[in-house]
Image (cartoon, rainbow, N blue to C red):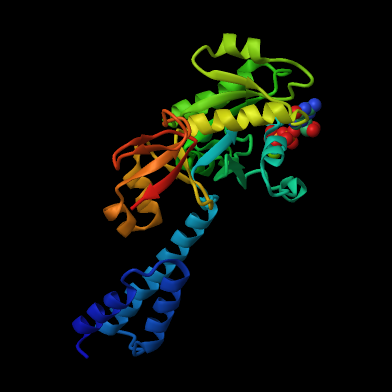
Amino acid sequence: MPHRTQMQVIKRRLVGKEGTERIRELRAILGDLPGYRNGPYADIRKWVEAQLEQTRTRKRVVHRDSVSVRREGAAQVALVGAPNAGKSSLLQALSDIQIKTGDYAFTTTRPVPALTRIGGVLVQLVEIPGLLEGAAEGRGGARPLLGVLRNADVILFCHDPAVPVDDLRAVMHELEEAGIHRPATIVATKADELDGTGQLRAAFPDLDVIGVSVLDEASLELLRDAIWRLIGLVRVYLRDGGEPVALQPPVTVVDVANTIHHELATRCTGARVWGPSARFPGQRVGRSHSLGDGDTVEVLD
Ligand SMILES: Nc1nc2c(ncn2[C@@H]2O[C@H](COP(=O)(O)OP(=O)(O)OP(=O)(O)O)[C@@H](O)[C@H]2O)c(=O)[nH]1
Ligand SMILES: [Mg+2]
């Protein structure tokens, strides 16, 4: 095979391959090459070896930065705040799954995901370790955490009112520097010890503040409601049961039918509705009726 063609074949073998897969392919290519010390084949060998080195470096870099969290559920909520603010405790208290916090005690650079249900809809919570200081300038190895935050739909700023509000300001400042703006609420944690809502409202007049204690189930329920409002999706329950659907507003009867089956969306004539958007329980509405959060529908065809 002429060496030019050989080069094309090699490049084609590498298309779309990254990381371990690319390394494996490059090794195989090296094995296939004739072992001339000079001439075009020696040049090709040199090129492949350089590629191998580059790919290895790239793989290491990607690895170091990959603290990413696989998205699950209808939305992702990031819990940020200074160390000891009570983030892990909140995550535990809100999630269905028991997280072994001990497992993460010394891996503080890793975000911790947990799933919770809010009104039946799965929502992912992610604790961001309190290491954000200097993150925007890439200090403290916290830069990848900003990447995780960029993926989040909403942010809960967690703050222990027993410590100065400047700690929270510092965290907010990092997000500001990084250009990360998300719908957010401040959670004044450990409310059983100290009611910090007044102090925090005064310090951050633009944000909602909610006092929460992990010992007080009612406060956790209010927090769930607040999170759902921040997320801003519309939950619709189906009359015959099953998982509720969560959609970006505005949500019509057709949108809901579409989540069940495309055909149903085409042929549906309307729905019967119970809940916030219905004038009375079981109201008959048309295809383009705009549904509200918490509605229950029976799609008619
Ligand atoms: N009284 C009371 N203590 C709490 C509450 N929430 C958390 N704590 C305590 O606050 C301390 C810190 O809680 P964590 O949940 O570990 O805080 P964190 O923000 O995850 O801390 P780091 O992961 O170290 O950044 C622990 O000793 C908790 O028991 C609460 O609602 N009430
Ligand atoms: Mg923690």
Residue 111: which quarter of the image? Answer: top right
Q: Nearer the viewer, residue 111 or 289?
A: 289
Q: Residue 145: give x, y in percent of width and height.
A: 54, 41
Task: Please give the name of the residue rendered at 62% of the width and 25% of the height, measured from the top-left corner.
Answer: 187
The number of numbered badges drawn on the structure is 0
Residue 126: which quarter of the image? Answer: top right
Q: Residue 95: give x, y in percent of width and height.
A: 67, 43
Q: Nearer the viewer, residue 11 or 47?
A: 11
Task: Please give the name of the residue rendered at 44% of the width and 30% of the height, measured from the top-left corner.
Answer: 280
Q: Residue 222: give x, y in percent of width and height.
A: 63, 27
Relative placement, left or right, of 217 versus 165 is right
Relative placement, left or right, of 91 versus 267 is right
Q: Classify 3 as above or below 195.
A: below
Residue 93 visible at all: yes
Q: Classify 176 as above or below 127.
A: above
Q: Residue 45: give x, y in percent of width and height.
A: 34, 79
**Quarter that holds the N terminus:** bottom left
Residue 133 visible at all: no
Q: Classify 132 as above or below 30.
A: above
Q: Nearer the viewer, residue 116 or 28?
A: 116
Task: Please give the name of the residue rendered at 60% of the width and 39% of the height, measured from the top-left corner.
Answer: 128
Q: Where's ligand 1: which quadrant?
A: top right
